[in-house]
């Protein structure tokens, strides 16, 4: 199911949230073992249907029928690497939009090589922190483990280069998110630092982006809507949280309660 958005902004994001809720897209997540449960719960809170199908022999067949696919390289053991290759090939053949999250690329050789290989399959969207995006573009050595040591604005040129080279939308996460399709650039000013204190705070965003990509042909519009909805829920949850634990629970509640009207009113996009 797809709607045409009149522009990339708060109005379009609100429309897309309503579409996700109405259509409940099936999202396949080949993601890391640390965040699998949280990611599934985030998709359920959003109104999407999660499927953590990451076995070779199953991943490809499932990707051909899913609404969207996430490939997250957080814990890329051998079997999951094979499943990712299989799913991405099937997604490319069937037109399933897929998101690449190149977790901790740069310093770690196995995932860095795999990210480069998968990038050649032209993901619809690439989501990562600034250090990961710079490393993916061959312009840096990665961050400190999964944490960025670079600012999103410093990765804009690299993101635009990758976007133009692979036909992908690049979502660079940080205090101010930088989102681009190589020509258009949108900056998102929503969010809260407590997202960085919860395991899966970044990884689950990739699955949410896949859910929005399942219902919208304009991948930049889908990415902007997903990032804005996610970060607005974080802001709301933070107002009631006493620390990371209560924030994580409150975030799921806030995402489930987020309305299109609240998204339209609260979005801070430039």
Image (spheres, grey):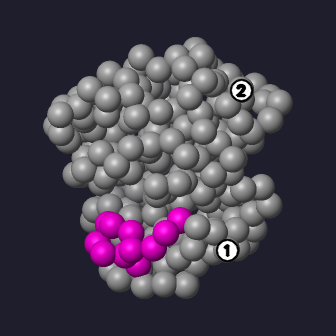
Look at the numbered disc 2 and give the secondary structure of its residue. Answer: helix
187 shown above or below 138? above
Mark 1 Cα within 10 Å, few/some/many (few <14, many 20+)?
A: some
Viewer can see residue 226: no
Q: Distance between the residues labelled 2 and 1?
A: 28 Å
Q: Which span is picked out in magenta?
A: 142-152
> Residue at horizontal 63%, vertical 51%?
187
> Residue at horizontal 25%, vertical 50%?
197
Q: How many labels does the image show?
A: 2
Look at the numbered disc 1 and give the secondary structure of its residue. Answer: helix
Please name whichever residue, 221 or 148, is drawn nearer the observer in this view of the structure.
148
Q: Where is residue 130 in the image (x, y as percent from the top left)?
A: 49, 68
Q: Mark 2 points at which residue?
A: 11
Q: Position of residue 78 (x, y in %)?
A: 30, 67
Q: Name the residue under label 1.
A: 157
Q: Is residue 185 left or right of residue 251?
A: right
| Quadrant into which the N terminus falls | top right
Mark closest to the chain's N terminus, 2 or 1: 2
Q: Which numbered marker is on residue 135?
A: none
Viewer can see residue 185: yes
Q: Position of residue 165 (x, y in %)?
A: 73, 72
Please name whichever residue, 158 or 125, is drawn nearer the observer in this view of the structure.
158
The quadrant where residue 23 appears: top right
In the image, residue 68 lies in the stretch drawn in magenta: no
Q: In this view, does 151 lie to the left or right of 186?
A: left
Name the magenta segment's main secondary structure: loop
Q: Is residue 118 left or right of residue 160?
A: left
> Residue at horizontal 34%, vertical 49%?
193
133 shown above or below 187? below
> Residue at horizontal 67%, vertical 31%?
10
């Amino acid at each position: 199911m797809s709607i045409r958005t009149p522009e990339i902004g708060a109005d379009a994001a609100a429309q897309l949230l309503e579409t996700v809720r109405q259509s409940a897209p099936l999202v396949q997540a080949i993601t890391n073992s640390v965040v699998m449960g949280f990611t599934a719960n985030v998709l359920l809170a959003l109104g999407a249907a999660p499927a953590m199908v990451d076995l070779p022999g199953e991943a490809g067949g499932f990707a051909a029928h899913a609404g969207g696919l996430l490939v997250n390289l957080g814990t890329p053991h051998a079997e999951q690497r094979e499943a990712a290759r299989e799913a991405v090939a099937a997604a490319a053949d069937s037109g399933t939009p897929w998101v690449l999250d190149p977790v901790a690329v740069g310093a770690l050789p196995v995932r860095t090589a795999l990210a480069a290989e998968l990038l050649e399959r032209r993901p619809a969207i690439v989501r990562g922190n600034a250090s990961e995006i710079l490393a993916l573009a061959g312009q840096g050595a990665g961050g400190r483990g999964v944490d960025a040591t670079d600012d999103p604005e410093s990765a804009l040129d690299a993101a635009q280069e990758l976007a133009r080279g692979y036909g992908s939308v690049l979502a660079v996460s940080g205090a101010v998110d930088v989102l681009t399709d190589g020509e258009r650039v949108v900056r998102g000013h929503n969010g809260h630092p407590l997202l960085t204190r919860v395991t899966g705070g970044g990884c689950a965003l990739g699955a949410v982006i896949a859910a929005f990509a399942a219902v919208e042909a304009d991948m930049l519009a889908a990415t902007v809507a997903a990032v804005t909805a996610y970060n607005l829920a974080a802001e709301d949850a933070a107002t009631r949280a006493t620390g990371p634990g209560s924030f994580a629970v409150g975030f799921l509640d806030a995402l489930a309660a987020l309305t299109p009207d609240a998204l339209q009113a609260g979005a801070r996009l430039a």
